[in-house]
Every structure is written in structure tokens, then in C-alpha cells.
Amino acid sequence: MVVAFILGGASWGATYGLGGIWYGFACGLGLLVLGLTLARPMRALALYTVPDVLEMRYRSKTIRLLAALLSLLALVGILGAQVWAASAIFEAIGLPGTAGAVLATLVFIAYTAFSGLWAVALTDFVQVIIGSVGIFVAVVLGLIKVGGINGLRGALEGIQGLPQPASSYFSLTSLGASLLALTLLATVMYTLIGQDFYQRLFAAKDEKTARRGAIYAGALLMALSFLPALAGMLAIALSGNPESIINSPKTAVPALVITVFGSGVGAIFVAAVLAAVMSTADSLLSAATSHMVRDIYASFINPKADEKKLLNLSVITTVAIGLLSLVAALTIQGIVELLIYSYDVYTSGVFIPLVLGIYWRRATKEGALAGMAAGSLAAVLGITGVVSFQYWEYIYVSGALVSAVVMVLVSLATRAEPLEGELEEAFSVRG
């Protein structure tokens, strides 16, 4: 999420100006809400995946399978956004975008397949911190170089061919109401149920650590959400060829870093950002692989598989999912757009069954399965254009609403199994 926060936010900053803060703000808000609500109870369950939690709550392997497939679909799309982000960095240093995407995919497939989650966790923190500090310093130096906010305003006013009038670049609502609402709601909803987030919650020392970590990270991202947007604006203002940034806004961060620091020092920070992209990508790959190996293969195909077989399958699965993410990146060529499409189907299907399963005792497995299927179907129909929505941004909202209505009605029409023993203790958070 931090990489998308930096590169995706800067891409939107180059296109929408200060209105681009909302994706980064939504990332932080989602983590904050996660920390205040689900982080503690979910960590207390001490499971491995979100489908694990759903199977435990509803005692249904079918629900587990469907949830795993939907989460896997979302992770492939989100991973594709990381591929596209890496290609932006390569493009900024002269390698064509498609070639950069292929190279990035091969690198993080190899890194994840042969080093595993331990190396992923070990490198995450350092890489993200270095990349974030680099962007912060670049924005500060960029503002000094351009003459502050007034100088930035004047520079943008003198550039032809901006995606919107220069004055709109300083409006927080330049995205428009529908896209702004989508960005906030979709990102928060996914954060509350995303396997890549829960993988970190489940790895936390205890419930208290999981809760505090999510809250602190969310507050920090919200406070810093203006930085990527400013980076995108400064990249255009300081570029010797602003048209190149306008036509390819994904290159805004690496272009700004090289402009401000020069090719030598700038290359170091660009490498740090690229390392952060790789770190995020291999975390996502590990999460996706856990679905295939644990939630699908070990649960349905070969429950008696030994560790060696599961390890070999993990390597094969990592390669396959990495290649699928490359296809997704080349098909939908936009970082934030690819993320949002990835959120749609998964949040439409899984959000309501997970949340109601924790907070509503009357939720039944029949209701959860029906709600999951109905919500996902509604989102797919909207994305493919079979059902027409006034704004595509409302696809996932409609899907979640359909899921909620169907789940509640079917739950009320079916018998709820009592939660006893371990289940009663695990889900007592619902009060």
C-alpha cells in the first residue's frame, strides 16, 4: 500500500493536482479504521488467511473456497499495479514501459520464489522507509527550487496541455464527487478485508501490537497524503519536458527525484523506490500463494500433502501468479485504476459476510454464501458493462449493497447454528 500511496498518489497529483491526495488519505484511513475495529479480534483468532476466518465462522469449506478465489483475483490485480509502478520507474530511466514491466515481474518472481516470506518481511521496513524519506526530501527541495507554492502555481499556469486548468490543480475536489467517494470507500473497504493486510496482522506479536501498528501506520499515511500529490505537480513544473509527464503520469516520482537530486544521487533514491515496489510485490505474491497452497490445494485437493510438496507447489504458484499479474498490468495501464478494479469484485463479495459474521450472531452460512455470490456477480456485471451504472465508480458500492440485502434476507430465512465453545469465544467481540 505504501508504494501505491507514493507512486499512485503522485500519478494522480500530475493529473488532478491536490485532489490526488485522496488516494493516499484513503490508504491511511483504511488502516486507521482497521486498527480501531477488526485488528484486535482478527489477530486474536491466530489464523493464516481471511478464508480461514470465514470457514471457522460459518463452518463451510465452500465459503472458504469462494473467498479464496475472490481474494486471489484481487491480489493478482493489485500485484499488477505494482508491476505497472515498477515499469514507471524503468521508463523514467530510459527503458520502455512494457520491457520494464516484464523485467520487474521476473525479478520479483525470482525473489519471492527462492527467498520466501522471511526475506519479504525482513526487507519491507528498510526499503519503504528509504523510499519515503527520498520522496519527502525531493518534495521539499522541489518546492524550494520552484519558489514555493506560489512559484508552483505560476509554473503550472505557464504550461500548455495540462489535463485540466492550472487553477484546478489547487482544488482538493478536482477529482469530482464520484471518483473521490469511490477512492475513499473502496480503499477503506478493501483494507478491512484484504489478505495482504491480514497477513501482517496475523504475524504481529499479539492483538495489542496489531491494533497499534495499524492505527499508527494509518495516521502517518493520512498526515503525509499531500506529499505524493505535490510530487506529481512538481514533476510537471520542474521537468524540461512536461508533456512527457502529462502523457505518462506514472513516471512523476522517478522523474522528480532525478530532476531534484541529479542523475547520481537521484538514481540511488529511484533504486530505493524500486526496492520498495519489489518488497510490496513479493508480499502480495506470498499472500496470493498462501491462498492457492493453503486455502485451495491443501484444503480441497490434497489435505495430506507433505511440506516438501507444498513448498514445490508454492514456487510453481508464485511463477504463475506473477505472470498473471503482468498480463493484468499490460491490460489495464494505470496504477490506481488497476487497484480500484481489483477492489471491486473482492470487496463486493467478501466485505459484508466477513463483517456481519463477526458482529451479527444471526448470520448464517447460507446467507453468507448467497451474499458473497450475489455481490460478486453484481460487480462483475457492472465491470463488464452488462448492467449499466451511471458512474463506474459505484460498481463496488452496488455490489456490496446487493451482498448485504441478499445475505440478511437469506440469513433471516435460514436457521442460524449456535456458536459454542471455541467459536463462541473467538467471535465474542460481537457483543
Image (cartoon, rainbow, N blue to C red):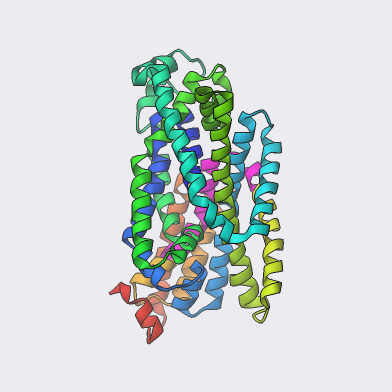
- Residue 192: image quadrant is bottom left
Q: Is residue 10 above or below residue 403?
A: above
Q: Position of residue 55 (x, y in %)?
A: 50, 76
State yes or no: residue 285 in magenta.
no
Q: Position of residue 173 (x, y in %)?
A: 36, 33
Instruction: Determine whether 340 is above or below 258 in the image.
Output: below
> Residue at coordinates 55% horizontally, 28% vertically from top-left?
265
Outermost residue on the left side: it is 431
Q: State whether residue 175 is above or below residue 328.
A: above
- The answer to whether residue 392 shows anywhere in this view is no
Residue 331 falls inside the magenta stretch: yes
Start and end of the magenta stretch?
Answer: 327-352
Figure disc tally: 0
In the rendered image, residue 116, in percent from the top left (x then y), is placed at 62, 60
The kind of secondary structure the magenta stretch mainly shows is helix
Relative depth, front residue between 70 and 121: 121
Between 35 and 378, the one lying in front of the other is: 35
Q: Is residue 409 left or right of residue 93?
A: left
Residue 50 seen: yes
Residue depicted at x 33% and y 65%: 208
User: Quadrant where the C terminus lies?
Assistant: bottom left
Q: Position of residue 417 (x, y in %)?
A: 40, 84
The quadrant where residue 207 appears? bottom left
For the point 38% across and 87% down, the residue is 421
Which residue is more in the foreground, 189 or 283? 283
Picture residue at 36% right of the left edge, 62% below the top: 209
Q: Decide which of 193, 319 is in the foreground and name it.
A: 319
